[in-house]
Image (cartoon, rainbow, N blue to C red):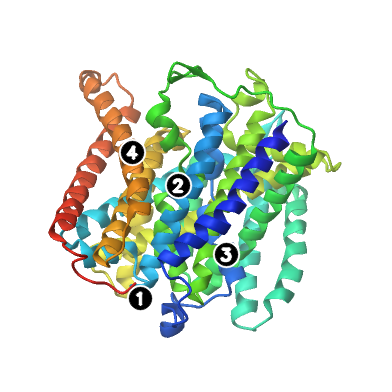
Amino acid sequence: MIYQIVLIAIVFFLLAFRFYGFFLAKRFTSGDASPTPACEINDGIDYIPAKPSLLLGQHFSAIAAAGPIVGPILACLWFGWLPALLWVVLGSVFIGGIHDFGSLMASLRHKASSIGEVVKVYMPKAHKFFLIFVWLALLYVIIAFTDITAHTFKTALSGEAFGPAVAGSSILYLASAIVLGVLLYRFKIKLWLATMIFLPLMLFIIWAGPHLPKQLLNLLAGISIKQWDVIILFYCLAASLAPLWLLLQPRGYLGGWFLYLVIIIGLAGALFGGFRIEYPAVNLEGFNSALNAKAIFPVLFITVACGACSGFHGIVASGTTSKQIYHFRDSLPVAYGAMLLEGLVAVLAIATVVMLPKGAEALKADPNLIYARGIAGYLGLLKVNYSIALSFALLAFSTFVYDTLDVCMRLARYVFQELSGLKTKLGIFFAAFINLLIPFVFLMSTKEKGYLVAWPIFGTSNQLLAGLILLVISVWLFKSGKNPVYTVLPMLFMMIMSVWSLLNMVISFIRAIPEILKGSAGTDIFISGICAIALLVLSMMLCYEAVRVFLSCKNGGLKADL
């Protein structure tokens, strides 16, 4: 039964937080009572101390986007639910959790600097290479998630267009987040009172989407996927320039409640719905997928992505979250706790596949629709109208993606500013515009499902970024006189799997060169190959510099504040 899988995962996550999480907290001394950078600087723009409950929701919704849903579902379909589940559970606890928590603590110990600035302190020769790598990885996230959201807004099932209703609800949701931000930070309304007002409002927005005026729904239905790509990118541009308090914090808080609500529904359906395991535990022929012949090593580990470990989390933790931590002790539940919650989201995503038999027609749909149907099926147990239930599930999915997209665009702006030195108001806008322009060109040059081209690059670069961030954390710990074994071992695993995947892409690209020169090969393999070569070169440079720094250190070398 499905409930057994979910219960085992929950118990394991709880035990991991209690024991391994507390072990890590002692190693990073997160019980420090000294003021955090958010409290010391508190500039009202980027450095704003936030209550743990508010920050957990914002951080969780920022990191838990399409990754822990799309990735685990694809891995489950390709390799069976058992390999996907094992990697999600073990990866979240022993790799993703330490990566996220270590990133946040490294940032806090360096005045809430980005992980790129931490690299500059300990590996100065690798600083520019690291920033370029991070910037490229963020652009892949923007490309993949923008296109996934655009496809969600065009979803149709059995002749009924659900996408326009979801798009309408999304617009209302974003507008309500801005109103919430104004009430919280300009009118100083209490958070509990705002929550009591805006949670029912969110439920009304879900209901309102399918019931918007026909003229408006028809207008939204007439927007093509490529046009939605452009609209979403311009939203990201505006969101990345807005103050944190106006959109990112309140939208993240509301998005967190969306996530909590979906988790509760998913848990209720998986635990009490009586659904049986239908999909095979292992879907392999040797070490390859029986569905599409993809090799489980390394494809499983770069496909699941955010569901087990994600370099993007480290950029969020050190880019925006560290600037909002009120007390050091908040770091463990916000970073490590959020990663375990994301692991639970991934487990529940896997459950939406497990309940379907192999070969079922529903499994041929895109992962977002498989997930939405699963959540709608759970709500059906409560006699919720299927149309409303599916609209809710699709809105929840697009909300998760929104919450990552505007954070990602802001972080890409930060990184580009570090690279270019653009600090003026005009420079800030120019940096944000460049981060819009490149995804725009990519998406306009690919076919309808551009995210399928970007996903392998996104997954590999994301996992390789996680390995590189763990490498940076290990250097920091080592130079601080600490034993970094609990970061070095996860780092080695992530680096091996990611480099393996990149080498496969490069080999496929080299083999396809004759077809590329003839013009008979698709653009997909060309884009993947060029990106893989660039990422491989950058990662090798960073690894070389890290090894050099390790070898040059004796007895802890340069001491850093820990």
Observer able to see residue 227? no
| Residue 65, above or below 519 | below
Height in image: 473 above or below 156? Answer: below
Secondary element at tag 3: helix
The residue under the point 81% across, 39% down is 380
Q: Give the residue type that dot 4 points to.
A: Ser
Is there CB contact under 8 Å for labels 3 and 1?
no
The residue singled out by tag 4 in the image is 498
Residue at x-position 60% and y-position 28%: 365
Residue 552 left/right relative to 401 = left
Q: Residues within 10 Å of mark 4 (few under 14, many from 20)?
A: many
Label 3 vs 1, first from the N-terminus: 3
Identified by mark 1, the residue type is Lys
- Distance from Cα at disc 3 to Cα at disc 4: 29 Å
Callout 4 touching callout 2 (CB < 8 Å): no
Element type at mark 4: helix
Q: In the rendering, which numbered label is found on residue 111?
A: 1
Q: Which quarter of the picture shows residue 323?
A: bottom left
- In the picture as drawn, the residue positioned furthest to the right comes out as 383
**Residue type, label 2:** Cys
Residue situated in front as seen by the camera: 192 or 444: 192
Q: Earlier in the sequence, mark 3 or mark 4?
A: 3
